[in-house]
Image (cartoon, helix red, strand yellow):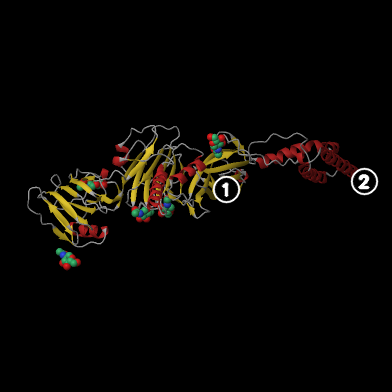
């Protein structure tokens, strides 16, 4: 009986290990935390400046951390350091093999337990700094005591810490803590002891369309991930609840995640559940990318709050170290948005920017953003305006329906209000926001802009096309009849009084011209638009065309 239970136990155990990653591929440890596709770095709080005190001393703070169950002997090299004060703080007992420098004064915060070993014998007597509960307290004490701080470095399980001395760098003057990888810190050289099982990965070397899967299992403490992606990548980012992935300057990438993603400062929250089981992740790959080929699958087992990950470009996977050193500052640019103009409501034919639009024609605009995989984003337009220096006019817009999936924002405009303005080149601009999750999270307002050429049209008074031929003929005949009747009446007056009624005749002509304007003076063909000053030309052409209707009675009168 016992052997059966034992056998079942072993069987279950085998089953669980087998399901671990083999659903995707067989994971291997990644020593040095880098392979052809991925680079993993721990990020910790730190800073460095070019501060030196008035008596020429640098001020360095070292915060030492130990992983649970790890007792390392750290080697601290001060021999090459510039004259300085080095303040060491730690909440755990540290063993330090010290390479002294008489120009360096060592301080240890009260409550920090350090066992110093000196290769040449003797035992150093570090000075005691006050107990500090937090990083900011140590920084504050150092700034008050020495006038400033040159560097603050957090080192977990350090193997070797070497102060190299400052070489006149251009640096900020105050040490403001921020997540960093100490790699690019000039004053200090850090070698940390790293176990090789922090990153596990399996991958194919080449891939047409790289698709990378990153899985942080639920028992890992990572909460913040700064991620660098090459353009055109597809990724699945899976982490424990509460993980936040920060991606700056993503270019043409597609993302699937169960966590919050911050794209250029714009937070996108995901409600999708993806467990850390590789089988479920694989299903998501199938479902959302319609693909079974996964270029790389990586599991991260590093128990720190903040990491940085680099996915390398397939084209330049030989490019290594130097690109990964600096943590680029978050770019101020937000998610890119653009506007495209169309001449018809089917949004098929983009408007050629050099072609001229008649101001009575509607122009159709489509505002779209870069898409990031399955993240649904909506665009909110708050206002639009047209600008042709120095004229700026608010531009009313109408929202157009859109039936495609993943619909951009569609608007239409009428430029009739620009009719009387002399300029023909206009910039059409709209203030837009990108929102996610039913407008709960929106970016700051940004502007999209397009230039276009607008041609004034003649506000064509010609209603002929609204009248049928018979109506036109009717009106013409009516006019003729009135003319005949008037002529008859005048004729009658002349016969009775003996002289012609010149004044009355003129007013009749004016009445006739009113009639012709509202009637149909222009025949059945459309008149050519006269390009400028529509109002006077409209009158004169109307008058000119009256001539024919009028001619019979007038000439007979004269
Ligand atoms: C260190 O802290 C202890 C208790 O908090 C205090 O009694 C002692 O005076 C402190 N030592 C120094 C040098 O400040
Ligand atoms: C420190 O860097 C600043 C620029 O950030 C520069 O103006 C200043 O001269 C530098 N100071 C020293 C001592 O090198
Ligand atoms: C998924 O892939 C299959 C074959 O590779 C293809 O026929 C199908 O159109 C794809 N579906 C989508 C939604 O891309
Ligand atoms: C993670 O990032 C958030 C927002 O940027 C920040 O508030 C939080 O302190 C960070 N946590 C860690 C452990 O760095
Ligand atoms: C949005 O605007 C506010 C105030 O104008 C500014 O403080 C904030 O940094 C902006 N956010 C982004 C992501 O640009």
Q: Position of residue 64 (x, y in %)?
A: 23, 53
The answer to whether the residue bearing label 2 lies less than 8 angstroms from the nearest atom of ligand 5 is no
- Camera-nearest residue between 302 and 453: 302
Q: Position of residue 189 (x, y in %)?
A: 21, 44
Q: Position of residue 94 (x, y in %)?
A: 19, 54
Labelled disc at residue 395: 1
Please name the residue shown 14% across and 44% down the image. 80
The quadrant in which residue 208 appears is: top left
Foreground mark, 1 or 2?
Answer: 1
- Which image quarter is the C terminus in? top right
Q: Can you tell me which quadrant of the image ligand 1 is in?
A: bottom left
Labelled disc at residue 496: 2
Quick one: which residue is furthest to the front in this view? 1
Residue 228 seen = no
Residue 54 seen = yes
Q: Secondary structure at mark 2?
A: helix
Q: Taking 67 as reference, is 208 left or right?
A: right
User: Separation of disc 1 and disc 2 at Cα?
Assistant: 64 Å
Please name the residue shown 78% across and 37% down the image. 547
Please name the residue shown 10% across and 57% down the image. 125
């Amino acid at each position: 009986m016992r052997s059966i239970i034992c056998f079942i136990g072993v069987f279950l155990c085998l089953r669980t290990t087998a399901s671990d990653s083999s659903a995707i591929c067989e994971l291997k440890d990644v020593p040095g935390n880098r392979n052809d596709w991925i680079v993993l770095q721990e990020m910790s709080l730190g800073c460095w400046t070019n501060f030196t005190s008035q008596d020429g001393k640098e001020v360095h703070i070292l915060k030492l951390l130990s992983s649970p169950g790890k007792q390392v002997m750290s080697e601290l090299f001060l021999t090459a350091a510039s004259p300085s004060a080095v303040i060491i703080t730690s909440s755990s007992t540290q063993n330090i093999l010290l390479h002294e420098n008489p120009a360096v004064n060592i301080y240890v915060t009260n409550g920090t337990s350090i066992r110093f070993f000196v290769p040449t014998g003797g035992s150093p007597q570090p000075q005691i700094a006050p107990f500090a509960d937090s990083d900011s307290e140590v920084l504050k004490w150092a700034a008050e005591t020495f006038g400033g701080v040159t560097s603050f470095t957090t080192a977990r399980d350090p193997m070797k810490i070497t102060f190299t001395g400052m070489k006149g760098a251009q640096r900020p003057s105050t040490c403001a803590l921020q997540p960093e990888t100490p790699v690019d810190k000039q004053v200090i050289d850090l070698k940390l002891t790293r176990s090789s099982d922090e990153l596990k990965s399996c991958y194919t070397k080449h891939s047409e369309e790289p698709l990378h899967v990153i899985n942080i299992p639920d028992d890992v403490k990572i909460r913040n991930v700064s991620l660098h992606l090459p353009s055109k990548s597809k990724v699945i980012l899976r982490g424990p609840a509460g993980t936040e992935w920060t991606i700056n300057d993503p270019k043409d990438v597609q993302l699937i995640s169960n966590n919050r993603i911050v794209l250029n400062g714009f937070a996108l929250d995901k409600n999708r559940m993806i467990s850390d089981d590789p089988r479920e992740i694989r299903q998501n790959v199938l479902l959302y990318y319609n693909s079974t080929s996964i270029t790389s699958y990586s599991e991260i087992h590093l128990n720190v709050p903040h990491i940085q990950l680099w996915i390398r470009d397939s084209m330049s996977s030989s490019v290594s170290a130097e690109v990964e050193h600096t943590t680029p500052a978050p770019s101020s640019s937000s998610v890119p948005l653009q506007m495209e103009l169309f001449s018809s409501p089917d949004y098929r034919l983009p408007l050629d920017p050099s072609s001229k639009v008649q101001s009575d024609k509607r122009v159709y605009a489509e505002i779209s953003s870069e898409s990031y995989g399955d993240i649904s984003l909506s665009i909110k337009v708050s206002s639009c305006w047209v600008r042709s220096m120095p004229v700026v006019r608010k531009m009313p817009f109408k929202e157009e329906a859109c039936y495609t999936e993943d619909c951009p924002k569609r608007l239409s405009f009428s430029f009739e209000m620009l009719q009387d303005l002399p300029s023909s080149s206009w910039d059409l601009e709209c203030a837009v926001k990108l929102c996610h999750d039913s407008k709960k999270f929106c970016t700051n307002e940004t502007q999209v802009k397009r230039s276009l050429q607008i041609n004034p049209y003649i506000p064509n008074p010609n209603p002929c096309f609204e009248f049928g031929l018979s109506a036109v003929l009717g009106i013409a005949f009516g006019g003729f009849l009135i003319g005949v009747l008037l002529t008859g009446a005048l004729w009658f007056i002349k016969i009775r009084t003996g002289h012609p009624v010149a004044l009355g005749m003129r007013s009749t002509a004016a009445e006739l011209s009113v009639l012709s304007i509202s009637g149909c003076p222009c025949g059945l063909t459309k008149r050519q638009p006269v390009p400028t000053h529509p109002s006077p030309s409209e009158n004169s052409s109307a008058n000119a065309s009256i001539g024919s209707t009028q001619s019979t009675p007038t000439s007979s009168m004269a």
